[in-house]
Amino acid sequence: MKRGLLLLVLSVLVGFTLQAQGQYNLGSHWMVIKGTSNLHDWQSNVTQVRGYGQMTSEPNLLKEIKSLYVEIPVKGIKSEKGSIMDGKTYDALKSGSYPQITYKLTKVTGLSAKGGGSFSVGTLGDLTIAGTTKQVDLWVSAKVDNYGSVSFSGSKKLKMTDFGIKPPTALLGSLTTGDEVEISFSVTLIKQ
C-alpha cells in the first residue's frame, strides 16, 4: 500500500515538473527594421531587447502561452548608416517622451504543431510605438528545445503613419523614407 502511494505521488510530481507553467525570460535575440527611401533601402539593428512571459511547455512541446511582454529601448536601435540616421530615427520615434517600444500579448488565436518541436502561433497584441498603441495580429514560428526554451521568429510590415510617425526626411527634404517598414526577429525565451 505504501509503495503504491509513493509511486503515485512520484508520478504526479514528475508529471507536474515536466508540464508546469513557468516563467520565461528573454535570452538571445536578433531583430532588424528594414525600410526604403527614394535613394536607397535602409536597415537598423535592434541591439537591446527585454522580455518575459508565462508558458506551459514540455521538452519539444508548447502547450500554452499565457502572457508575453517585449520592450525595446528606442536608443538601442542602431542604423548601418551611422549616427545621423540614428538621430532621425530617435526624433521620429519621439524617444525623449517615449523611450520604449512595447509589445504585450493579448490573445493567442492559434497554436498548431508542425512536428519536431516546431509550432505555428497566431497572436493578437498591443504594440506601442511613439506613444500610440495599436492592436496587431502576428503569425510566428515557434520552436521548443529539449530543455523547454522557446524560440519565436517572424516578421511584420507596419506603416509609420499608423502610429502617428511622420516618415523621416533628410538633405532638405530631397531624401524621403517610405511609410512602410518591416520588422524581422528571432527571440529565445528561457525557462526560469
Image (cartoon, rainbow, N blue to C red):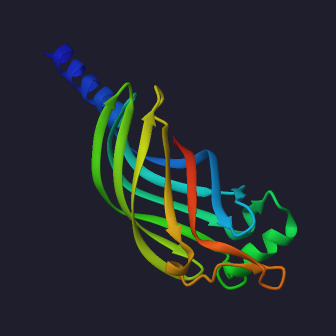
Image coordinates of residue 172 in percent, x first then y, are 83, 85
> Is 144 placed above or below 92 here?
above
Tell me what residue is drawn at x 70 percent, y 70 percent: 38
In-image side of 66 versus 46 (left or right): left
Image coordinates of residue 171 in percent, x first then y, are 84, 80
Tell me what residue is drawn at x 45 percent, y 65 percent: 104
Quarter of the image where the N terminus is located: top left
Residue 72 picture quarter: bottom right
In-image side of 140 versus 102 (left or right): left
Q: Number of labelled discs?
A: 0
> Is 87 placed above or below 41 here?
below
> Is 133 placed above or below 180 here?
below
Q: Does residue 95 show up?
A: no
Tell me what residue is drawn at x 49 percent, y 36 percent: 149
Q: Which of 99 and 167 is in front in this view?
A: 167
> Is 114 placed above or below 190 here?
above
Residue 105 picture quarter: bottom left
Residue 66 picture quarter: bottom left
Tell me what residue is drawn at x 18 percent, y 17 percent: 2
Image coordinates of residue 68 in percent, x first then y, are 44, 57
Q: Nearer the viewer, residue 27 or 37?
A: 37
Q: Nearer the viewer, residue 147 or 111?
A: 111
In-image side of 124 versus 146 (left or right): left
Residue furthest out toward the left: 1
Image coordinates of residue 80 in percent, x first then y, are 80, 57
